Image: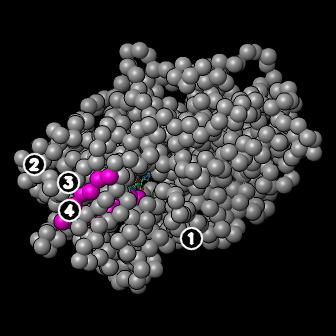
Amino acid sequence: MSDDETRGPAPSAADGPLSRDFERRTFSDRERAVIRPLAEAVFYDESDRDLSDRFDWLVPEVDRLVSATSWRVRLAYRITLSLLSFAPFLVSLRFCRLSTRPVTERAALLARLDHHPIGVLRLLLVPWKTALAFVYYEHPAALAETGYDDTCATGAPRRPGILGVVPLAEVTSRRSRAHGGPT
Amino acid sequence: MTIVRGRDLTDGFTESCDVVVVGSGAGGAVFARIAAEAGRDVIVLEEGGYYAPEEYGRFRPSESLARLGREGGMSAAIGLGDTPLIVVNMGRAVGGSSLWTGAVCFRIPDRVLDEWVREHGLTDLSPRHMESAFEEVERNLEVQEVPSAMISRSSALFAEGGRQMGVEFARLRRNTVGCDGCSRCTFGCPHGAKRSVDLSYLPQAREHGAVVYSDCLVERVVVERERAVGVRGRILGPPQGRPTHRFEVRAKLVVVACGTLHTPKLLATAGVGRASRQLGRNVTLHPGFRVTALFDEEVLGWRGAMQSITSDHFHEEGILLNSVYSAPSVLAAGMPGVGPTLARYARQMRHVAVFGGMVHDSAGGTIRSIPFSREPALFYRMDPRDKARGIRAIALLAEMAFLAGAREVMIPMFGAPPIRTMDDVRRFASSAPPGPRLECFSQHPLGSARMATDALRGVVSSRGETFELGGLVVADGSVVPSSLGVNSQVPVMAMATRIAHLAMEDWRRHAA
Ligand SMILES: Cc1cc2nc3c(=O)[nH]c(=O)nc-3n(C[C@H](O)[C@H](O)[C@H](O)COP(=O)(O)OP(=O)(O)OC[C@H]3O[C@@H](n4cnc5c(N)ncnc54)[C@H](O)[C@@H]3O)c2cc1C
Ligand code: SF4
């Protein structure tokens, strides 16, 4: 599925499409395949509902958010992701990858990591929990589960259209008439 | 404001004008408007993109972080010693950080201005000298007191807890018109109610012919015969927003308003700061702390202005209390645990109130450029006094929450379980938690090119002119001489107002 197909809580058609942002991507398919089971564990709620649509949407959106950062932050995300993929080893010295474990076990492992006596290990999850939660709880279904009931995010601005985007040529000729022009 | 969207350009450009302003945030927009009104030909260059309010009002919070924010909202000051990692939020779009504010408006307190006169020798920053600048900014931003109907239940509970401790709260003043209280201010107001500079100062500058170029990263100041004569940089274009075509803008006056973190980097390209060695130093952050409380009653904290009440009851202890709130996704990210525990807390969002406080800090920050990185590194060593103030602020907020009837309180400490009693608060306060375990944020980085009376103590004069190079003025948060102890937008704009008027009065000298 392409990123566009999974684009999330879409504004109503009447609002028109949002302008496209730069096309940036940080994580390889292999890394995305780690992000998804990580997210499933972070948001595991003991129900056996099929939430795959949320996670299909979440992974590219989180990639987009992280991709808006500098290479240093992106590197930190990649390093912490690869360390988290070895959470079973960090928590209980078992040689297996997080993504190979059932979701109940993944969630339990992350909970133990979250309370790990070694401070640095405890902090490993923080950037990922933050980025994942920022996006996950924007999915309309997940947001509704929190009890949030406002609709303002799609409200119409009261002071629209004050600024106008114009082509450079028009600006240059206007300025040159007013001020003697570009060099 | 006429906008040229850099990302749509297929080639570079060369322009000349009277005044080139680098950065379209709170400081830059003020300068642009005042210079344009004075009849100068003004070009504003902004690294970030341009999004109309009709558009950013529809962004989800994470989209706002990615498109309007710097580092996707994940910039941080690296804590040295017993210091937390401090998340530092900044804007990066046409309008800069003003798009992000909670709309809270404070003047610089007289006690701070008096200190600048007394201890820094900045006699023309006295309350009397600054009065007209504050008035001008407040008029243009349409600052008014929050109507009581806009006080959210979350803020009312904060005030209730405070009252029980003998702490009075006052209504905040905000730069909003027609705010309907949807608590989304810090991701871009969806109703155009918040008078951020893209809706106030920049359109006013447009009426006088100013032009803004978005997606234009200024990389250096051009210096000829020991004078700044323009700037050079590259357009950030598709497909990935990386630097593409080159541009150059020559000007009689170069105004740097890149914000506290990025102004030093640009000034350094002109050799500024070598003499004083003060460039990039003396950064203050107003470290902020947030306590999240769960109540039995439904709070629905998003109904009302995001920030509406304040108390300076503890100002002698260096603490300012402000009501706060945030998007549910952001609040959920700070809730305890993962898996079922996180899910259980996130589902109680209707019962959540948030109380906030910030510390009037000493200048513990230093900015350093990093090779091959656009983003500089900010290091911050928290003074032990400020750390104690932070812990005291958290304890006060938690106490107020319990006094207002909270059943559980989440203190901003990584891995800490929620607390349930006043005894827990006392235990927290006396436990002296290590700095790195505290969760701390800042929205007010200030002071990296501070104003001073001479080049040994600062980077710019009280007119905002750099000591070391002619034709170069700074008009943003970097010039603030010391911590303000209050939110910084109006203070930055008032200082930029003064600097811009002085530059226009002195235009002949600049144009010579
Ligand atoms: C989340 C948040 C909430 C806030 N809430 C409040 C509040 O309620 N009340 C209050 O008083 N203050 C608040 N503030 C603080 C206030 O917004 C800032 O103090 C103020 O905007 C700083 O103005 P500035 O001009 O220094 O920088 P900014 O407004 O950040 O503007 C700097 C601009 O320069 C651009 N730039 C940087 N480098 C370059 C370059 N090389 N080339 C081109 N462009 C460049 C940046 O992209 C940016 O747009 C808040 C800030 C944030 C982030
Ligand atoms: S509370 Fe809502 S309407 Fe009011 S200023 Fe904030 S975002 Fe705009």
Query: What separation in Å lies between label 2 and label 1 (alpha carbons)?
Result: 47 Å
Frontmost of labels 2 and 1 is: 2
Q: Is residue B287 magenta?
A: no
Graded by Cα atoms within 10 Å as few (under 14), some (14 to 19) or many (20 or more), the crowding at tag 1 reads: some
Query: What separation in Å lies between label 3 and label 2 (alpha carbons)?
Result: 10 Å
**Magenta part of the protein: which range?**
B246-260
Can you identify the residue that label 2 sits on?
A: A176
Frontmost of labels 4 and 1 is: 4
Is the residue under label 1 in contact with that under label 3 (CB below 8 Å)?
no
In terms of sequence position, does the residue under pointer 3 or pointer 4 come before the other? Answer: 3
Is the residue under label 4 in contact with that under label 3 (CB below 8 Å)?
no
Query: What separation in Å lies between label 3 and label 4 (alpha carbons)?
Result: 9 Å
Can you identify the residue that label 3 sits on?
A: B15
Quadrant of the image containing the C terminus of chain A: bottom left
Q: Amino acid at mark 1?
A: Gly
Horizontally, residue B132 falls left or right of residue A97, namely left
Quadrant of the image containing the N terminus of chain A: top right
Q: Quadrant of residue B394?
A: bottom right
Can you identify the residue that label 1 sits on?
A: B364
Q: Amino acid at mark 2?
A: Ser
Graded by Cα atoms within 10 Å as few (under 14), some (14 to 19) or many (20 or more), the crowding at tag 3 reads: some
Secondary structure under badge 1?
Answer: loop
Frontmost of labels 3 and 1 is: 3
Residue B215: mark in rendering: none
Secondary structure under badge 3?
Answer: strand
Can you identify the residue that label 4 sits on?
A: B251
